[in-house]
Amino acid sequence: MSKKYQVVGIGNAVVDVIARAEDTFLDLMGIQKGIMQLVERERGETLYAAMKERVQTPGGSVANTLAGLGNLGLRTAFIGRVHDDALGRFYADAMEEDGTDFVNAPVPGGELPTSRSMIFVSPDGERSMNTYLGISAELGPEDVSEDVAAEAEVVFLEGYLFDKDKGKDAFIRTARTCRAAGGKAGIAISDPFCVERHRDDFLSLIENEMDYVIGNEAEIMSLYQNNDLEADLAAVAAICPLVVCTRSGDGVSIIHEGARYDIPVEKVVPVDATGAGDQFAAGFLYGLATGHDIDTAGRMGCVAAAEVISHIGPRPEADLQDLFKTAGLI
């Protein structure tokens, strides 16, 4: 009996608001170039109002991964929180249009506004991100429907949500409900700084609640701080059956139940590196959810990541199935 959803993601529902901006504008507005900064509500509203010809797209790391899985034709759902405002309704509708069930209705009333990231693209292609976390950071266990989590073959959690206790509780509820019903649960670490703040909780989550973990070198190394990637990989592999480490131009290293896979990638200069990790996860989870072996799943992740860095924006534009066929993976 197949479940209603092949992959359910839980994460921040953030509208990406993108506008081109000269460096002089960044200086004028006091925006630090090329980095991601969290901003308060008032600052967020000022920056939003100052944007010319803005383009809005549904963003957030796990949501980008789900868009990739939707491109691949999987049945997906997203657990996240938006306010019942113009941006929140836009986000919910856009996810549905991409083929992902947005299972939590926009929240009405005097709540925080929908989360948004104001992204200023300089003439040289550098992106300066100013993220106002808003309502999505308030996600808690009451937002996790038991029916949705139990109907997932795979759940995928976004580390950023781990900053608040209720986010942790929402994770654990989702993972336990999914696993009790025979599914697999895993996490994208998201950010080494998030680990710094909650290392013991992160390690406990990975050891006790997770079937897989995905992170880049900095994220994997932040867990145990051995200052040696091989030692850190071995340490994570000792507590989790499937560890995936993306190493940018050096490819991907995967340890699954003691067996190691190193997948090379072709080094290219990215047009826009945004979304590389999110789409790697999409390709990899597609392989996992459709019963391919670990090596093939890793290669699928690399093909999806290569597609997304070849153009502007964090979501795939080409048909990933076609690319997998060309690469001889399906």
Image: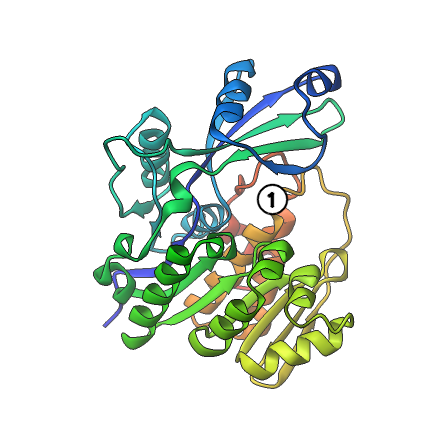
Between 130 and 268, the one lying in front of the other is: 130
Residue 297 placement (x, y as % from top left): 54, 67
Is 176 placed above or below 125 here?
A: below
Residue 22 placement (x, y as % from top left): 71, 17
Mark 1 closeness class: few <14, some 14–19, many ≥20 residues within 10 Å: many
Q: How is the image coloured?
A: rainbow
- 3 on left or right of 31: left
Label 1 SS = helix
Taking the spot 44% from the left edge, 72% from the top edge, the residue there is 291
- 5 on left or right of 45: left
The quadrant where residue 314 appears = top right
Between 100 and 58, the one lying in front of the other is: 58
Taking the spot 53% from the left edge, 62% from the top edge, the residue there is 284
Circle 1: residue type: Val
Q: Which residue is mark 1?
A: 308
Residue 299 placement (x, y as % from top left): 61, 64
Taking the spot 37% from the left edge, 31% from the top edge, the residue there is 113
Between 179 and 273, the one lying in front of the other is: 179
Q: State which quarter of the image contains the N terminus.
A: bottom left
Question: Can I make out residue 181 in this image?
Answer: yes
Q: Residue lying furthest bottom in this view? A: 258
Question: Can I make out residue 153 in this image?
Answer: no
- 64 on left or right of 22: left
Give the number of callouts: 1
Residue 313 placement (x, y as % from top left): 58, 36
- 108 on left or right of 283: left
Is 83 placed above or below 7 here?
A: above
